[in-house]
Amino acid sequence: MLVDEFIEMCYNIFKNEWLKQVSGRLSNEMSNEKIYNMAFAKVFSLLIAKAEKKGRTRAEVLEVTSWLTGYTTDAIESALATDLTYGDFFLGAPRPNPNRTLFTGVVCGVRVESVEEPLMREIRYLDKLVDELAKGKPMEKILRGKLCQTTKTKPAPAGVIPMPTASMNKKQSTIQKRSGPRQVLA
């Protein structure tokens, strides 16, 4: 009888732990989808408000966003006037800065370098940059000394959000299908 009780107890513990893990993954994926489908203009205005509340400027938020993604500031401003989703903004980044992967640290309780979902990691990079702005760090430290300036490479056509590359994962292509074709920002 004791052996049966012990086996049942072990089974219940295993089952509960497994259910916690599965439900955690599902809720994480659902919350990621919500973030990806939010309007870029809405999220970006919150990032600007966060920086301005701490004495930084809209221009500085545009600069770090441009450094991270390769968009020109004019293209970012144009994207704010459209119904572009936050996920699509990052999927269409013309020249993501190669030094973005050097970021480490915690933002919103999440360690940036340990985020597994590629699109969410890109979003967290921008969160980290704006967080550093809000903390009062000098711009040259935030941009890591501009080790890889986006101006050294050939600029993307003004205002164009390119199609994502063929290397995007299944979730990213699903987001693209739901949100429709890419837009040319003028």
Image (tube, rainbow, N blue to C red):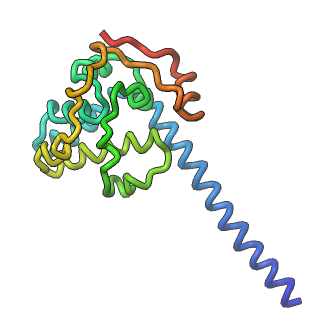
Say which quadrant the C terminus sits in.
top left
Asked if residue 147 lies left or right of residue 2, the reply is: left
Give the percent coordinates (x, y) of residue 130.
Answer: 24, 43
Question: Closer to the camera, 88 or 95?
Answer: 95
Quadrant location of the N terminus?
A: bottom right
Relative to the observer, which residue lies in front, 145 or 172? 145
Q: Is residue 117 above or below residue 170?
A: below
Q: Position of residue 80 (x, y in %)?
A: 30, 22
Farthest residue, direction right = 1
Q: How many marks?
A: 0
Residue 93 sits in quarter: top left
Q: Residue at x 23, y 37 (%)?
A: 148
Q: Percent position (x, y) of residue 11?
A: 77, 73
Image side of residue 184 versus residue 129, left or right: right
Compared with 19, 47 (above or below) is: above
Residue at position x 28%, y 36% in the image: 68
Q: Quadrant of residue 86?
A: top left
Q: Quadrant of residue 59?
A: top left
Give coordinates of residue 154: x percent, y percent.
26, 21
Residue found at x 85% / y 87%: 3
Identify the residue at image location x=10%, y=43%: 55
